[in-house]
Image (cartoon, grey):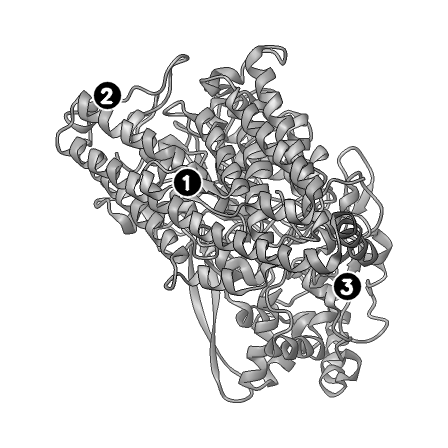
Amino acid sequence: MSIAPRCLKPLALAAALPLALTACGGSDDNSGPSLTSVKSAAVASYADLMVANYSDVIALAEEMQTAIVAFVATPTSLTLEAARDGWLTARPYYQQSEVGRFYDGPIDDADGPEGDINAWPLDEGYIDYVNGNPTAGIVNDPTTYPTIDEALLRSLNGVGGEENVATGWHAIEFLLWGQDESTTGPGERPFEDYTVNDNATRRGTYLTVTTQMLVDDLSSVRDEWLPTTGAFRTSFLAQDVDSSLELILTGIATLGVGELRGERILVPFDSKSQEDEHSCFSDTTDLDHIFDGIGIRNIWRGEYDAADDSLDYSGTGLDEVFQAGSPTNAVALGAAVDAAVAALEAQDSPFDQAILGLDTDPGRVALQACLDSLSAFNIAISNAADALDLEVTSF
Amino acid sequence: MPSHNPIRVRPFRRPLWASTYLFGLALAGCGGGSDPVATNAPPFDPAEEFPGGATTSSLSSSLAFSRPLANLNLAEADDFFIGNSLFNITWVTAPASVVNRDGLGPLFNARSCSACHTLDGRGRPPIEPDEPLLGLVLKLVQDTVTPAGVSAGDAVYGDQLHPFGVFGVDGESSPSVTYEIIDGVYTDGTPYELRSPIYQSGAPNYGDFEGSIFLAPRVAPAVFGLGLLDTIPEQDVLAWADPNDLNADGIRGRANWVPLIGGGLTLGRYGWKLGQPTLLQQSAAAFRDDIGITSELFPEQNSSAAQGIDEELFSGGDPEIPLDSLDQVDFYMHTLAPPKRRDVSAPNVRRGREQFFSAGCADCHRPTFETGTAGSIVELQQQRIFPYTDLLLHDMGPGLADGRVEHQAGGSDWRTPPLWGIGLLEVVNGHQFLLHDGRARGVAEAILWHAGEGLAARDLFLQLSASERQDLVDFVEDL
């Protein structure tokens, strides 16, 4: 039997499945309304959780911005370290918010800013100098790009190839850490890149401009989720509850299966190339993976553990929806989510070393377990969605 | 700057069949206008909302062309993700520390597949005067045809111009484009403007081009849905062919039979003139011709001995992309899904659908096929699809002709391009430059360029009212 996530199955089967399950779960008449009310509560909780998550990320990104502005004003090894800490602190909370992707929501609908926020892999030489090419990149080309500002960077992002990334988390990461030439640690960009080295002032401008853009873009996404004023939230809560549930499930399924399993783990696992890893400059790719997994678990549980405790959120999770609608699948999917997070947390660090070697080496064994656990998650979420007659795409 | 050999718009000798064909067209032009009965639209089929059947992607965002077949089995899908990464990676000059992605050039049009097929979508001609040519290539063409059945290229430069070279190697020239504006008027008196491109090669860096060379531009087409086209049974394509116009409708769809590497002639399905038989061969040709990456299928570099470039110095291996990786790209090319339609029931879209059939658009932009059972990817099989192409060649008249011969495709012949996803180009690629060289600024201009076998349909479009024209465009943009 196909485990294809999109259930375009024959009508007769589609009709029969939920009937059979509700028959097991209890009487149709009694379980129907309560399932519907749990679904509505879960959809509303999801919207609130997105507000909490993005608000948290924005506050952390603003703290990072403060540190970056201070660093560019007074570049020292200490202020550089503080700027890097700002990135490292904010990043895991952004990763958790990635569950909001892949369904034409605020982050990545037709005019969504995702491509400016988190595009990767990034061709370093598009932005700045690289080993072997000291004059590469926009930073070192004042003739073509006399003024570095938001309009320029937005116009250059993604032009001439999908790896020509000019903005977002990974551009900032590269400007703070530089290329990772170390087998044990991250990149070691000297703070002198912002004092005496070539095009230091332009580099500082680039860093502050793209940081400001990140804060602005995150805010524009959060605003669409806000109560009353958020356009997307309004339609999300107004439409048929199953349609919104399908979006929520598609978000966590595609993040876990297509993106995390496929693009972020499988590709570098197969190529054994650092060029294919997610946060290669700061050597935090393993954390990216873990917090994507935790983001999925947040939606399952209806909980968000914020950096700012006042933003902690606890509401109705998907777990309650499936407990009401298909208890067997609730157990199976819950176990699959927990197993995936456990597997992700067990991977070795740094990722660029873990992918190397033989398939029997510990690093690769642990990563194979991540791949397998996310495959199992795919089957579990596909089965669960089928049981509630929901159409869900997982990559 | 010296202007060497600018494009010549219709320099080629018309093949012998052309005169009889023109006669047929004239007859059909009359018949088509007065007898629209045969082109009434069939009843709307709800399946039209899902142009790729069960494979259809549900996204309408910038990722609309980048999703795998929606029914793909994950257990078999690993190559999709690896193929995707190979499609996106930037190839670098050899030798380099990243050994599995070096070997760029020495001459090239782009450093990655996605540079031109950005987000698996469509390239475009330059907009700014000094913008480098990226997203389309210029073929170098002579009137003579080689024994292999294609137009001869330049003795030194070969059959494709490479504006770029790796560090230390000059690009072949820096071509540019300008446009001549052509004024026209719809029957209702509304004026319109078309852009006719004039390509300049720029000063050549490896000696003069041969005197008889002209330039044939081709933009990079979108690459989703190709696996479905690959799975259409050959006999279903041939069933629509009408090379002698036996039904006297002025439309002579013709198959292109093209050589398969390894031997034999196969139905051409890919490329602007159906010049490539398989996605593997098409992909391998593009790697070599456009990026300078050799493979088992195309082991020779894309520069000629006369250019005196030390190919060994820049070799990234022999071949530069191993067959395993090429197979993964091939799998990726097969498994990108077409996007769902957005507004299939809107009244304007439904009216436009009627216009589309009444004007005869559907006579070449064949709405639907059922895929067969060929190939190893079962998800592609037995799907009712709506690509809006007949996978056949049509003479599109002198205005669009580029003079390049590819096997049975003559200088003014083009494949009917699929129309699925066309309405999402703006979202994915930020433009709507259509036709083989991106000269048309949107659907209406593309229709207005139709001549030859498309002339009757264009003339009917000209006669529509403004709101009827808009309905037709709205329908196409919903595809």
Q: Secondary structure at mark 2?
A: loop
Residue corresponding to mark 3: B253
Q: What residue did someone put label 1 on?
A: A118
In the picture shown, does residue B254 fall above or below B1? Answer: below
The local crowd at label 2, few if under 14, some if 14 to 19, many if 20 or more residues have their Cα within 10 Å, is: some
Q: Find numbered disc 1 in the image and state the secondary structure of the residue it sits on.
A: loop
Q: Residue at x 31, y 35 (%)?
A: A172
Q: Residues within 10 Å of mark 3 (few under 14, many from 20)?
A: many
The earlier-in-sequence mark between 2 and 1 is 1
x, y percent for residue A250: 59, 47
Q: Image quadrant of residue A131?
A: top left
Q: Position of residue B338 (x, y in %)?
A: 65, 53
Q: Is residue A146 left or right of residue A381?
A: left
Determine the secondary structure under disc 3.
loop
> What is the quadrant of the C terminus of chain A in the image?
top right
Residue kind at label 1, given as amino acid type:
Asn
Residue B260 in the image: above or below residue B425: above
Q: Give how far apart the Cα atoms at labels 2 and 1 are.
A: 24 Å
* Disc 2 and disc 1 on one polypeptide chain: yes
* Percent of width and height locating residue A310: 32, 42
The residue lying toward the viewer, choosing from B475 and B285, is: B475
**Disc on res. A190:** 2
Residue in view at x 38 percent, y 57 percent: A226
